[in-house]
Amino acid sequence: MIDFDAIASAELRAIPYEWALVPQAIEPGQAAALIDTFPVDDFWRLQHDDGEKSYTYSARPLVILGEERPARLSPLPDPWQQLVEDLLAPRYGDALSKVIGRGLDEAPMEVAVWRWDEDAQLGPHLDMREKLVTQVFYLNGGWNPWWGGCLRILNSKDEGDVHSEIPPLLGSSSVLVRSDESWHCVSPVGDAPVPRRSVIVTWFQPGSSSPSWYEDEDGVVQSHARPPGGVRQTSPEASGVAALEAHVAALEARVAELGAVRAALTDVRSRKSVQAALAVANRLSRVRGRLAGRA
């Protein structure tokens, strides 16, 4: 499912810090299957704002930090089981190691699936120091940038100081190497017809504990976040169909394009009307001048 070679050959960029974009990290047909079978249960609504970092989104753990198996939640559909197997395979860690130029053999990994509904957002921030590198796999059949939900690589902690903007396109992936300069954010999701979906894979410093999830003494998955910051969602959210999402996005983009064309035509017509009126006024002025001369 995961294109290990595509990840291993990705270019690590150095400005404004170390990051990479993998245009096709998951084979398109497989990525579409992940959308069509997107999990609908076992999500937590996570919300936080401490003045330095703010976020609102829903998340479900797939692999809890340090474990070598899926989190003990509702059974995953077959495509998602395959994804987890690929992420736990040594070949995945080796591929990512080639990108960032450092080994990950001793680094524990955590995986979660994130769903961004309307008004979800992630403000400008640096990842916690325990994190080494994060890879985000995007799972939307179609996405228009004006819906928000784009990863922004920032030059500074200023949200408007954008170096690059990455829309969550089907099967693509971003890689962020944690540093004291690795400022980034996700633009707020607006009136999008479907949720923004992604899978977050984070590699931590050896000996780290999960900041997000744990299993209690009964083996029940719990979130470290407490209400109102972390609320277990009991009503399943609808999943999506990849082909339909792509169609909706394309239609809206076409409508926006036609709207821009109409606006341009209206502007041209307005300018022509003004120019015509000025031409008539000039002719009238010349006629008045000739009549005045005869008088």
Image: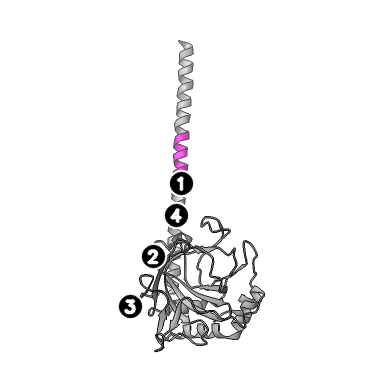
Q: What residue is at 36 percent from the left and 72 percent from the top?
A: 227
The answer to whether residue 268 is magenta is yes
Determine crowd level at label 2: few under 14, some 14-19, many 20+ residues with C-alpha closer than 10 A. many
State how far apart marks 2 and 3 are (Cα).
18 Å
Could you tell me if residue 287 is visible in this image? yes
The answer to whether residue 10 is magenta is no
State how far apart marks 4 and 1 are (Cα).
10 Å
Asked whether, in this view, residue 102 is left or right of residue 266, the answer is right
First in sequence: mark 2 vs mark 3 = 2
State how far apart marks 2 and 1 are (Cα).
33 Å
Q: Residue placed farthest to the top in the image?
A: 295
Mark 4 highlights which residue? 258
Mark 2 highlights which residue? 118
Q: Secondary structure at mark 1?
A: helix
State how far apart marks 4 and 3 are (Cα).
41 Å
Mark 1 highlights which residue? 265
Task: Give the percent coordinates (x, y) of residue 161.
Answer: 55, 55
Return the residue nearer the eye: 71 or 138: 71
Q: Are marks 4 and 1 in contact (CB under 8 Å)?
A: no
Q: Secondary structure at mark 2?
A: loop
Mark 3 highlights which residue? 234
Of circles 2 and 3, the one toward us is 3
